[in-house]
Amino acid sequence: MIAVKHRLSLLTAAAAFGLSLMAFNADAALPAGAQAPTFQLQGALAGKPLTFSLQQALQKGPVVLYFFPAAFTKGCTLEAHDFAEATDDFKKLGATVIGVTAGNVDQVGKFSQLECRDKFTVAADPGAKVAAEYQTQMQMGGKTLSDRTSFVIAPDGKILLSYTDRNPEAHIQKTMDAVKQYAQSHS
Protein backbone atom coordinates (compact mmCIF):
# COMPACT_ATOMS: atom_id res chain seq x y z
CA MET A 1 0.00 0.00 0.00
CA ILE A 2 2.82 2.44 0.85
CA ALA A 3 4.56 1.62 -2.47
CA VAL A 4 1.34 2.38 -4.39
CA LYS A 5 0.91 5.73 -2.60
CA HIS A 6 4.55 6.56 -3.28
CA ARG A 7 4.13 5.76 -7.00
CA LEU A 8 1.00 7.89 -7.14
CA SER A 9 2.89 10.76 -5.49
CA LEU A 10 5.67 10.42 -8.04
CA LEU A 11 3.17 10.34 -10.91
CA THR A 12 1.40 13.41 -9.54
CA ALA A 13 4.70 15.24 -9.17
CA ALA A 14 5.73 14.24 -12.72
CA ALA A 15 2.39 15.44 -14.11
CA ALA A 16 2.70 18.77 -12.29
CA PHE A 17 6.26 19.18 -13.59
CA GLY A 18 5.09 18.43 -17.13
CA LEU A 19 2.35 21.05 -16.86
CA SER A 20 4.82 23.61 -15.55
CA LEU A 21 7.06 22.99 -18.56
CA MET A 22 4.12 23.54 -20.87
CA ALA A 23 3.44 26.88 -19.19
CA PHE A 24 7.11 27.83 -19.55
CA ASN A 25 6.36 29.24 -23.02
CA ALA A 26 2.62 29.21 -23.56
CA ASP A 27 2.65 31.35 -26.71
CA ALA A 28 3.67 29.70 -29.94
CA ALA A 29 6.07 31.60 -32.18
CA LEU A 30 4.73 33.39 -35.23
CA PRO A 31 4.02 30.67 -37.80
CA ALA A 32 5.28 30.24 -41.34
CA GLY A 33 3.13 32.35 -43.65
CA ALA A 34 2.78 35.22 -41.18
CA GLN A 35 4.17 38.68 -41.88
CA ALA A 36 7.39 39.31 -39.95
CA PRO A 37 7.34 42.42 -37.77
CA THR A 38 10.08 44.85 -38.80
CA PHE A 39 12.52 46.14 -36.21
CA GLN A 40 15.73 48.06 -35.62
CA LEU A 41 18.05 46.96 -32.83
CA GLN A 42 21.47 47.95 -31.56
CA GLY A 43 23.98 45.18 -32.00
CA ALA A 44 27.49 44.33 -33.04
CA LEU A 45 29.42 42.64 -35.81
CA ALA A 46 32.99 41.58 -35.01
CA GLY A 47 32.68 43.52 -31.77
CA LYS A 48 31.88 46.79 -33.56
CA PRO A 49 28.58 48.49 -32.62
CA LEU A 50 25.94 48.91 -35.31
CA THR A 51 22.23 49.32 -35.85
CA PHE A 52 20.54 46.35 -37.52
CA SER A 53 17.41 47.04 -39.55
CA LEU A 54 15.37 44.04 -40.68
CA GLN A 55 13.78 46.13 -43.43
CA GLN A 56 17.20 47.06 -44.87
CA ALA A 57 18.49 43.48 -44.61
CA LEU A 58 15.44 42.14 -46.47
CA GLN A 59 16.25 44.42 -49.41
CA LYS A 60 19.36 42.27 -49.96
CA GLY A 61 17.61 38.87 -49.73
CA PRO A 62 16.18 36.45 -47.18
CA VAL A 63 17.06 36.83 -43.51
CA VAL A 64 17.81 34.06 -41.03
CA LEU A 65 16.65 35.53 -37.73
CA TYR A 66 17.37 33.44 -34.69
CA PHE A 67 16.48 34.27 -31.11
CA PHE A 68 18.57 32.84 -28.28
CA PRO A 69 18.20 33.16 -24.50
CA ALA A 70 21.55 34.62 -23.38
CA ALA A 71 25.09 35.16 -24.61
CA PHE A 72 27.87 32.98 -23.24
CA THR A 73 25.60 30.17 -22.07
CA LYS A 74 26.40 26.64 -23.21
CA GLY A 75 23.59 26.11 -25.75
CA CYS A 76 23.76 29.66 -27.10
CA THR A 77 27.51 29.43 -27.58
CA LEU A 78 27.17 26.12 -29.46
CA GLU A 79 24.45 27.59 -31.65
CA ALA A 80 26.54 30.71 -32.37
CA HIS A 81 29.49 28.55 -33.39
CA ASP A 82 27.28 26.51 -35.74
CA PHE A 83 25.75 29.63 -37.31
CA ALA A 84 29.24 31.13 -37.68
CA GLU A 85 30.45 28.03 -39.54
CA ALA A 86 27.39 28.17 -41.84
CA THR A 87 27.34 31.94 -42.44
CA ASP A 88 29.41 31.83 -45.64
CA ASP A 89 27.04 29.20 -47.07
CA PHE A 90 24.04 31.38 -46.15
CA LYS A 91 25.73 34.36 -47.84
CA LYS A 92 26.30 32.32 -51.03
CA LEU A 93 22.52 31.81 -51.09
CA GLY A 94 21.95 35.55 -50.60
CA ALA A 95 20.82 35.28 -46.96
CA THR A 96 21.78 37.44 -43.98
CA VAL A 97 22.12 35.88 -40.50
CA ILE A 98 21.15 37.84 -37.37
CA GLY A 99 21.08 36.56 -33.80
CA VAL A 100 18.90 38.37 -31.25
CA THR A 101 18.92 38.00 -27.46
CA ALA A 102 17.00 39.57 -24.60
CA GLY A 103 19.42 38.07 -22.08
CA ASN A 104 22.59 39.85 -20.90
CA VAL A 105 22.25 42.45 -23.66
CA ASP A 106 25.40 44.20 -22.49
CA GLN A 107 27.44 41.24 -23.76
CA VAL A 108 26.43 41.23 -27.46
CA GLY A 109 29.56 43.03 -28.65
CA LYS A 110 31.95 40.60 -27.03
CA PHE A 111 29.73 37.63 -27.99
CA SER A 112 29.70 38.73 -31.65
CA GLN A 113 33.47 38.74 -31.68
CA LEU A 114 34.28 35.65 -29.65
CA GLU A 115 31.45 33.20 -30.23
CA CYS A 116 29.98 34.42 -33.53
CA ARG A 117 33.54 34.51 -34.81
CA ASP A 118 33.08 37.92 -36.49
CA LYS A 119 30.76 36.25 -39.03
CA PHE A 120 27.31 37.68 -38.31
CA THR A 121 25.51 40.39 -36.37
CA VAL A 122 24.17 39.85 -32.88
CA ALA A 123 21.60 42.32 -31.57
CA ALA A 124 20.34 43.22 -28.11
CA ASP A 125 16.60 43.09 -27.41
CA PRO A 126 16.24 44.87 -24.03
CA GLY A 127 13.00 43.86 -22.34
CA ALA A 128 12.36 41.18 -25.01
CA LYS A 129 10.20 43.62 -27.02
CA VAL A 130 11.07 42.14 -30.42
CA ALA A 131 10.84 38.62 -29.00
CA ALA A 132 7.30 39.50 -27.88
CA GLU A 133 6.38 40.65 -31.40
CA TYR A 134 7.62 37.31 -32.73
CA GLN A 135 5.88 35.49 -29.86
CA THR A 136 9.10 33.83 -28.79
CA GLN A 137 9.60 35.10 -25.27
CA MET A 138 9.90 32.91 -22.19
CA GLN A 139 10.22 33.34 -18.45
CA MET A 140 13.34 32.05 -16.74
CA GLY A 141 14.55 32.95 -13.29
CA GLY A 142 12.03 35.77 -13.05
CA LYS A 143 13.31 37.37 -16.28
CA THR A 144 11.72 37.59 -19.70
CA LEU A 145 14.13 36.18 -22.28
CA SER A 146 13.97 35.23 -25.91
CA ASP A 147 13.30 31.54 -26.48
CA ARG A 148 15.49 29.55 -28.89
CA THR A 149 13.52 30.11 -32.10
CA SER A 150 14.71 30.45 -35.68
CA PHE A 151 12.93 32.14 -38.55
CA VAL A 152 13.67 32.42 -42.24
CA ILE A 153 12.07 35.54 -43.68
CA ALA A 154 11.62 36.17 -47.41
CA PRO A 155 12.43 39.60 -48.84
CA ASP A 156 8.69 40.40 -48.96
CA GLY A 157 8.56 39.93 -45.16
CA LYS A 158 6.74 36.58 -45.24
CA ILE A 159 7.97 34.03 -42.69
CA LEU A 160 9.10 30.92 -44.55
CA LEU A 161 10.21 28.94 -41.48
CA SER A 162 9.37 29.17 -37.80
CA TYR A 163 11.17 26.64 -35.62
CA THR A 164 11.36 26.52 -31.83
CA ASP A 165 13.48 23.97 -30.00
CA ARG A 166 15.55 24.50 -26.86
CA ASN A 167 18.15 22.14 -28.29
CA PRO A 168 20.34 24.26 -30.61
CA GLU A 169 21.46 21.42 -32.88
CA ALA A 170 18.75 21.36 -35.59
CA HIS A 171 18.38 25.13 -36.03
CA ILE A 172 21.16 25.55 -38.58
CA GLN A 173 20.07 22.64 -40.78
CA LYS A 174 16.40 23.66 -40.74
CA THR A 175 17.17 27.28 -41.61
CA MET A 176 19.66 26.24 -44.32
CA ASP A 177 17.07 23.92 -45.88
CA ALA A 178 14.49 26.73 -45.92
CA VAL A 179 16.95 29.20 -47.48
CA LYS A 180 17.96 26.63 -50.13
CA GLN A 181 14.32 25.96 -50.94
CA TYR A 182 13.68 29.70 -51.28
CA ALA A 183 16.79 30.16 -53.46
CA GLN A 184 15.78 27.26 -55.75
CA SER A 185 12.26 28.61 -56.21
CA HIS A 186 13.59 32.10 -57.05
CA SER A 187 16.46 31.27 -59.40
Image (cartoon, rainbow, N blue to C red):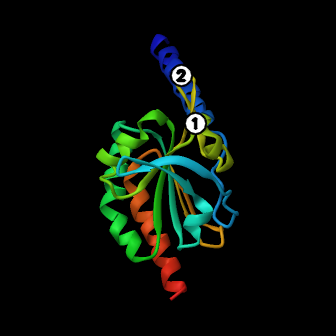
**Please, what secondary structure does the residue beneath circle 1 have?**
helix
For disc 2, the marked residue is 13
Q: Which mark is residue 23?
A: none
For disc 1, the marked residue is 126
Residue 138 visible, this angle? yes
User: Hey, what amino acid is under mark 2?
Assistant: Ala
User: Hey, what amino acid is under mark 1?
Assistant: Pro
Compare marks 2 and 1 and give the one earlier in the sequence: 2
Name the residue rendered at 40%, 42% in the picture.
109
Q: Quadrant of residue 97?
A: bottom left
Name the residue rendered at 37%, 47% in the picture.
112
Q: Nearer the viewer, residue 84 or 163?
A: 84
Q: Is residue 64 left or right of residue 110?
A: right
Q: Is residue 87 left or right of residue 174?
A: left
Residue 21: image location, x then y, percent:
56, 33
Q: Residues within 10 Å of mark 1 (few under 14, many from 20)?
A: some
Name the residue rendered at 44%, 71% in the picture.
177
Name the residue rendered at 44%, 54% in the picture.
121
Q: Nearer the viewer, residue 130 or 5?
A: 130
Residue 139: image location, x then y, percent:
58, 31
